[in-house]
Amino acid sequence: MSQPARPNVVLIMADQLVPFLTGAYEHSVVKTPNLDRLAARGVRFDAAYTPYPLCAPARVSLMTGKDASSIGCYDNAAVFPADQPTIAHYLTNAGYETALTGKMHFVGPDQLHGFRHRLTTDIFPAGVDWVPTVDENGQFPRGGHAHEYVLPDVGVRPWTKFLTYDEETTYRATEFIRERARGPMAEPFFLLASLHHPHDPFHVTQELWDLYDDEPIDLARVPADIDRSAMDEWVNEAHDTAGVDLQDPDNLYALRRAYYGLVTYVDRKVGEILAALDETGQLDSTVIMFTSDHGDMLGERGMVQKRCFYEWSARVPLLLTFPDDRFAGRRVAEPVSMMDLAPTVLDIAGIPEEDRLPMQAASLLPLLEGDPPGERAVFSEYHVEKVRAACFMVRAGDHKYIYIDGHGTQLFDLANDPDERHDLSGHPEAAAVETRLHSLLTGRFDIDGINAGAAESVRRRTLIRDAMQRNGTRWDFVPTFGQEGRYVR
């Protein structure tokens, strides 16, 4: 079957999903049959990166195809400006019916950003409640997150509100698909279904825990002689990793086993969405995309969460499946960015270049169609939240370069050092590579402007946060589902 001229597009997102810990990326233990099927039917990108290893800015980049800093989004409380065109705006104008279900971390009074339908509320606040704060010494408060990575805060729970959220997210996605099948289907649709898991807390049901009862569980690796960058030190201090034992085998085992269970849970939700498409006869007219906003260190290098550029944090899964299976089984080794999905979606929908405003992302279709535009350089950035300077990454070819403004650099040869144990920055034999990558990075980002803009943004939002809290102002989106006219009775 050939691909329809204007196919439906379903984009499924996970949160904090490490690609290495899925069967689709050849992990031998983690059970992900639905993701495995997508990878077999379509394209797997083996060097896909987040544009920002933090939830809200990464999603802003996905929606706009732009670096988050270029539109003033620096952290999880940064307002997503309503005047920024998104893929939902473009698709709506092109005649697509657009719907969003699940978490997207939209901060600000605009909670639609071009979507015609928003089918759930968000799981986190839409206000600037989380604007980063520091003490009188310029330090971020300690105590965040690391305790959620060790016993007793990982493991089995009867149920959680986060599981309920993903159940609702998936239900609304499948109902949207079924309602489309009941109607005339004159217009194609774009559905973005965004799940919370496997984001912490790492609480699983007994059934998910028991799936891995007799399975070998990989434990995090923490080399004794590891070199730590300034960025490592900052985020570890803020996460309070010193306050927990991330080398205790029992802690590491429970963490990974619970994470495996949550990855399988996400895979099941993906399966439910695929089943709804299949059962309603729409699978053969739908492009399916799967990705995550970023990964999770999961104890690797003695670190937790995201907020850094190492592979466990910055790499993301990226799978594309087309109706005609014309790229079935394809593996793409070239580095790409998760935000490259923005122009890719517009290409798939047939929206001409002349009808688009400039993006910094690049469509993935030329890579698939045999016309790659030379070497691709992929960028990522991180600022403000738990760090004390602007931080950047560029990956080109096999090399990854990290620049921490005023606080050093790192350079890794991922072909020969995939675990990023040997920093080549400052080595004479790597000087040419380091110079070239630094030039690429400074050509992309206005570093001084980002530092100034981020500091000013925090000052503005702190004032607004305090006023909103005093006034009780809320921007949270609450959907309503009236029953009148929905059924014959």
Image (cartoon, rainbow, N blue to C red):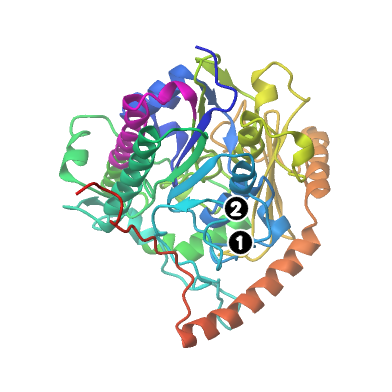
Q: Which residue is mark 1?
A: 80
Residue 270 falls within the magenta-colored stretch = yes
What predominant SS class does the magenta segment belong to?
helix
Give how far across and how far down residue 314 sits, in percent.
56, 43
**Amino acid at dot 1:** Phe
Q: Up-down: is 247 above or below 106?
A: above
| Front position in the image: 26 or 8 | 8
Left or right: residue 180 versus residue 61 is left
Residue 179 appears in the rendering: yes
> Which residue in the rendered view is the most extreme toward the bottom?
470
Q: Residue at x 68, y 32 (%)?
A: 363
Q: Residue at x 76, y 35 (%)?
A: 353
Left or right: residue 160 versus residue 326 is left
Element type where label 1 sits in the image: loop
> Which residue in the rendered view is the most extreme toward the front?
489
Q: Which residue is mark 2?
A: 60
Q: Which residues are magenta?
A: 260-287
Left or right: residue 46 versus residue 431 is left
Residue 364 falls within the magenta-colored stretch = no
